[in-house]
């Protein structure tokens, strides 16, 4: 038998009041040609328009959590707890994949 394993990538974006830099991050994830992706965004209860902005990309986001947290590392750990992928990748607000075929 010939089995083909297609690993699932959990991409976790942690954000807080980062609306100005978040669009490039989200677009770099949803434009990946590799499709077995779970996209998780953990927002630390932003006070700017981050959450409303994310709404237009909601169909591409598998898990969205917006609640106060204890900072970056607590938010990252929260993302790990939600992740179901074979591999984890942190791509925080302001980061982006180099190309559409990075994964």
Image (cartoon, helix red, strand yellow):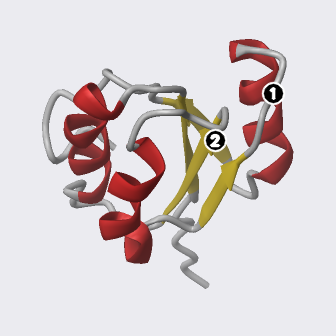
Lateral position of residue 15 relative to residue 49, left or right: right
Where, quadrant-wise, is the N terminus in this rendering? bottom right
Q: Residues within 10 Å of mark 1 (few under 14, many from 20)?
A: some
Residue at x 31%, y 60% (from the top left corner): 34
| Residue drawn at x 56%, y 66% as measured from the top left | 5
Q: Determine the secondary structure under disc 1.
A: loop
Taking the view exactly as shown, the residue that stands out farthest to the bottom is: 1
| Residue 16 percent location from the top left of the image | 53, 26
Front of the two marks 2 and 1:
1
Q: Which mark is residue 46?
A: none
Residue 75 screen position, x and y as percent: 74, 28
| 32 or 25: nearer the viewer | 25
Residue at 81% over, 37% down: 78
The local crowd at label 2, few if under 14, some if 14 to 19, many if 20 or more residues have their Cα within 10 Å, is many
For residue 69, say whether it is visible: yes
Figure check: 61 above or below 92: below
Pick whichever of labels 2 and 1 is earlier in the sequence.
2
Q: Toward the viewer: 49 or 66?
A: 49
- Where residue 69 is drawn, which disc sits there? 1
Q: Are marks 2 and 1 in contact (CB under 8 Å)?
A: yes
Relative horizontal placement of residue 30, taking residue 68 as reference (left or right): left
Residue that extends furthest to the front in the rendered view of this protein: 47
**Vertical side of 99 occupied by 56: above or below:** below
Depth check, front residue: 62 or 66: 66
Instruction: Tell me how many marks there are.
Output: 2
User: Residue 42 got which mark?
Assistant: 2
Distance from disc 2 to disc 1, alpha carbons, whole Å, reads 10 Å
Q: Quadrant of residue 35?
A: bottom left
* In front of the other: 66 or 82: 66
Q: Secondary structure at mark 2?
A: strand
């Amino acid at each position: 038998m010939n089995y083909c394993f297609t690993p699932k990538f959990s991409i976790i974006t942690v954000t807080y009041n980062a609306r100005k830099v978040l669009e490039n991050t989200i677009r770099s994830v949803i434009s990946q040609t590799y499709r077995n992706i779970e996209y998780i965004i953990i927002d630390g209860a932003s006070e700017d328009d981050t959450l409303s902005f994310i709404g237009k990309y909601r169909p591409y986001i598998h898990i969205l959590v917006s609640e106060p947290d204890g900072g970056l590392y607590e938010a990252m750990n929260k993302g790990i707890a939600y992740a179901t992928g074979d591999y984890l990748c942190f791509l925080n607000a302001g980061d982006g994949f180099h190309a559409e075929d990075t994964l």
